[in-house]
Amino acid sequence: FTIRGRERFLTPRAAAFAPAVRDALQHIQCSIISSDPFDPARADRLFRIILSDFVTLVFFEKLVERISREAPAVSFELLPVDDSPDELLRRGDVDFLILPDMFTSSVHSSIALFDEKLVCVGCPTNKQLPQQLTFERYMSMRHVAVRFGRTMKPS
């Protein structure tokens, strides 16, 4: 490290070693430190989770109610969808990803947490909306979409 003022900065050599050191520390944590079984009632831990705004509203809000009763000292840092969530998980920078299947990879194990029915809401005077809206018709129309991250992935 080098010191400038009251701040420390990585030297170029330290920055080059950082990924290997991070991986080694992660391995140590997984194999030695985390060998005790997880006891929610006694756990005092921060979990970092990447999840979409939709998942926060639909799923996570209900989960927090239960966790606050069963694991009162557990806390969360909720992070928005990133351009490379799998890499953040691999490095140990986050603990969980809660994302739609289309944003996950086969590199990490996953399980379905819930199914949600999505609906299309449109103006009744919109002549592009027929009585029966098919998926193909829906996909051919223009949409409003939220995008996140540097690569602007749709939510």
Image (tube, rainbow, N blue to C red):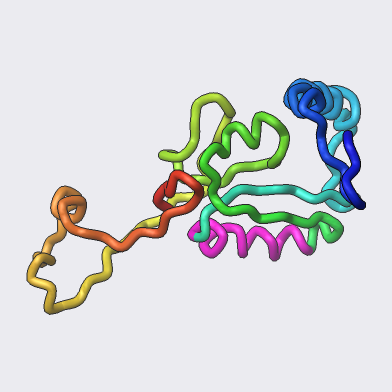
Span highlighted in magenta in the image = 54-68
Q: Was residue 99 drawn as part of the magenta stretch in this picture?
A: no
Residue 102: x %, y % from top left: 41, 39
**Observer-nearest residue: 136 or 26?**
26
Residue 138: x %, y % from top left: 19, 55
**Observer-nearest residue: 120 or 116?**
120
Q: Quadrant of the N terminus?
A: top right
Give the left or right position of residue 5, taking residue 93 as reference.
right
Residue 66: x %, y % from top left: 71, 61
Give the left or right position of residue 131, taking residue 43 as reference.
left
Q: Residue at x 63, y 53 (%)?
A: 79
Q: Residue furthest bottom?
A: 125
Q: Residue at x 7, y 71 (%)?
A: 127
Q: Is residue 40 visible?
A: yes
**Observer-nearest residue: 89 or 40?**
89
Q: Residue at x 21, y 59 (%)?
A: 142
Q: Is residue 30 visible?
A: no
Residue 111: x %, y % from top left: 54, 37
